[in-house]
Image (tube, coloured by chain):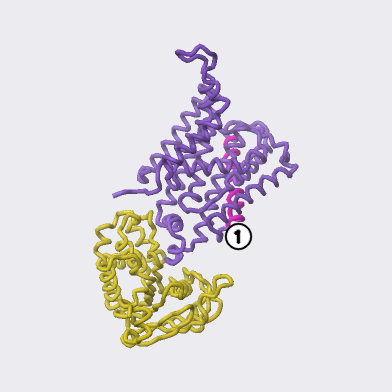
Amino acid sequence: MLEIKNLTVSYGAISALHGITLSVQSGSIVTLIGSNGAGKTTTLKTVSGLLKPKSGEINYEGKNIAGLPPHEIVARGLSHVPEGRMIFANLTVLENLQMGAYLVRDNKIVRRELEFVFATFPRLKEREQQIAGTLSGGEQQMLAIGRALMSQPKFLMLDEPSLGLAPLLVKSIFEKIVEINRERGLTILLVEQNANRALEISSFGFVLETGKITLQGDSVALRQNPQVKSAYLGG
Amino acid sequence: MNFRHAKTFLLGAIALGFLASLAANQINPYWLFIFYDIGIGIVMAVSLNLINGYTGQFSLGHAGFMAVGAYTSAVITNQFGELNFFVANGIFAVSLYAGGLAAALAGLLVGIPTLRLRGDYLAIVTLGFGEIIRVILQNMEKVGGARGLSVNHGYTNLFWTFGLAAVTVYVVASLVNSTYGRGFIAVHDDEVAAEAMGINTTKYKVTAFVVGSFFAGIAGGLYAHSKQFLTPGGFGFMQSITFVVMVILGGMGNSVGVILAAILLTLLPEGLRMLSGIEHLPGFSAERPLGWIGDTRMIIYSLLLIALMLTRPQGLFSFRRKRN
């Protein structure tokens, strides 16, 4: 569904990705793990159009989308949940979700998506009229994911959904991710520092180190890999 | 402001402005001109609030757009001699509109290339733009250059000033409270996230800039026909700062707060001046016992601003719109 070929991205003179190649199968959960500064967020931002690549291809459903503006990429069904949640703090929960459906013209679809999001995250329904900035961290993460779902994506990119959340919440967020993947057949590319959990729920994984893919394979195999174990899984 | 009552508010304010303008000859002219300044201040502050408050950009060139509107409308009405009441007001309306359009065009011209910039950088560019306008006007002999331009007609009255102030408040409120308008607040809250949602953030920023400049141009026209004399120096950087202070003091993105701040900041220097003119206070034998206030008026004004910012850094009213 998504194929990245020899993608290089740089911030001014500093190169962040030196030609990475990866692919994501339709309907699967694929994870990208790596330490701080490896280029995980850069990869997602480039796919969603927030950053322009220096060279390389990003093929989505057979078409190269590299360098397109973000709103055209969202319109094609790619949705990005940015790192650190980045909800609209001054809008209500409902308005945040409606902003997610910004490019959806049909109100019926918006209502249907809204129902799905509220069914997935009942907590958001309870807080519908609350100003989003006053939600707890976990609720904000639910909102960020819910908001991304509102654009009717076929492909969802999640950047560090577990960041700064209590372990119990992390568990429930990951369960929701699996649920969304199963119920909607949504393809998910998950970027995580919590490699253990990410490999548990994904079918395939890539390891990114300082701008290069150094390892890839079945998630089960990666979890057994001694290198991955010592570097990312805590021995 | 509760948006449901916005239309009632709009009609009420216009009607009130109309009634007040009928009674204008009963009002002390000194006060009348202060009222004009208040109304113009409201138009400027509320329109700047769309850019700096709701959309979260930082423009330091609002007085520049005001200048474009002021000169445009003045040049138009100066083409005509004495006219009867209805024709005069018609021409005035057209000239105000033209001033607004000219300012909006200037806003668009500045906006498109510069709004890709963020924060401080945008502030510096808009500051530079305001200065460019001032310098161009200073060197345009056709509008009097540095000597200034005298405006033949004093068309500005309470009806126009407060009617247009009400229209500005109404338009900005409708824009921000519409489904489309949530995009402004989304851009304000998080530009990256807004972009990731598929919102064309540049388009929103340019829209905010163009609409804001349009109203600044209209305020300029009101200003021109109230003061009846324009100098490029009157639209300098300090003037822009005054409007920015109104927005910040009012609470970025809160129309009611910004209106109150515009009123307060126009009245405060005048109020202090009046205080200093008090002849005798009980218990004082000296003439003008508060005369020192007059001499240190601007220092007191600045100190009050500092005190206000220290005690209410979020502005008189904060941005959050609703609470549950």
One can see residue B155 in this view: yes
State the hue of chain A: yellow
Q: Which part of the image, by quadrant, shows the C terminus of chain A? A: bottom left
Expressed as whole percent of the image width and height from the top left, the position of residue B103 reads 60, 48
Expressed as whole percent of the image width and height from the top left, the position of residue B25 reads 53, 23
Q: Residues within 10 Å of mark 1 (few under 14, many from 20)?
A: few
Q: Residue furthest right?
A: B141
One can see residue B256 in this view: no
From the rendered image, report the letter of the chain displayed in purple.
Answer: B
Q: Is residue A199 above or below residue B102?
A: below
Q: Which secondary structure dominates the residues rendered in magenta?
A: helix
Asked if the magenta segment contains residue B97, the reply would be yes
Q: Is residue B205 above or below residue B68?
A: below
**Mark 1 belongs to which subunit?**
B
At 40% from the left edge and 64% from the top edge, which residue is drawn?
A102
Horizontal side, residue A164 vs residue B39: left or right: left
The residue closer to the viewer here, A109 or A164, is A164
At 53% from the left edge and 72% from the top edge, which residue is drawn?
A52
Quickly name the residue at label 1.
Answer: B113
Provide the secondary structure element on which disc 1 rests: helix
Q: Which residues are magenta?
A: B88-112
Q: Which part of the image, by quadrant, shows the N terminus of chain A? A: bottom left
At 26% from the left edge and 70% from the top edge, which residue is drawn?
A172
Asked if the magenta segment contains residue B236, the reply would be no
